Image: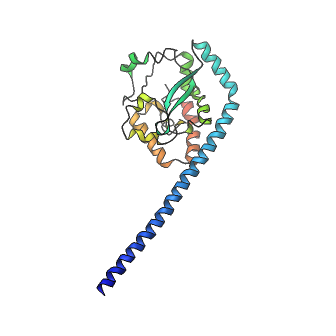
Amino acid sequence: MANDSVLDELLSQMAARKRSAITGGFRMAAWRATVFGTYVAKRLFDLLLSAIGLVLLSPLFLVLAVAVKLSSPGPVIFTQTRVGRYGRHFKFYKFRTMRRDAESQKGPLEPFNESADGVIFKMRRDPRITRVGRFLRRTSLDELPQLWNVFIGDMSLVGPRPPLPDEVAKYTLDDRKRLDVIPGITGIWQVSGRSEIPFKEQVALDKRYILSQGFFQDVKILLETIPAIIGGKGAY
């Protein structure tokens, strides 16, 4: 009788584990389906809005291109290597806001970096920025060419900002979690204060976005971006 009782208990435990495995499998499948559905919805949203933006804003692109060209010698579009999802490098585009030799002049300015964490470089009165460039940065109009990055899939409308390779080299393992999603033109910390937020706090906000990202949250952040740009807080 005792042996029968032990056997029944073992069979019961095995059945419970099997039911748990099946339930866990369904939950995992449902989670994966939700993640995939969110990705597809986000990509379609990005593709549609970036295409519309590129077409409707083309006259503004032309005006800004002329203004940049007349402001200082050099190309209209500034191209830079940035780090995207899972560490993949891609070409990042924006209207040029600095002098042509800006990259070579960054080294001497490092002691004046105003970023508290020292990972990213931020300087309120950066002497490399042109007069037109200051206006473009304050209004975020310099970011408009990134609509092309969104259209081709390197970026999203909403997500963590894409960092430079030399910034990623300084990342901790925790910081690298912000590379788990496609980077965006705007994001949760851009509507919360932009450059005035220390890097570690930016990472915390990005991780919060990654854990709770969804279509409606992206729409909310996009809508909040408009007053953030108008207010100009932290834009330099």
Judged from this view, the residue extending furthest toward the left is 2
From this view, report whether residue 206 is shown above or below residue 82.
below
- Write the residue at 61% across / 47% down: 41
- Write the residue at 43% across / 33% down: 197
Task: Describe residue 110's horizontal placement relative to residue 70 as left or right.
Answer: left
Which sits in the foreground, 92 or 138? Answer: 92
- Write the residue at 38% across / 73% down: 13
Where residue 26 appears, x then y in whole percent?
51, 63
From this view, report whether residue 143 is shown above or below residue 105.
below
From this view, report whether residue 33 is shown above or below residue 71.
below
- In what quadrant of the picture does the N terminus appear? bottom left
Q: Quadrant of residue 221?
A: top right
From this view, report whether residue 134 is shown above or below residue 18.
above
Q: Quadrant of residue 175?
A: top left
Residue 165 visible? The answer is yes
- Write the residue at 39% across / 36% down: 200
Which sits in the foreground, 133 or 146? Answer: 146
Count the marks: 0
Where residue 69 appears, x then y in whole percent?
61, 15
Where residue 108 appears, x then y in whole percent?
39, 16
Identify the coloring.
rainbow
Which sits in the foreground, 194 or 155? Answer: 155
Residue 139 visible? The answer is no
Where residue 171 appears, x then y in whole percent?
38, 35
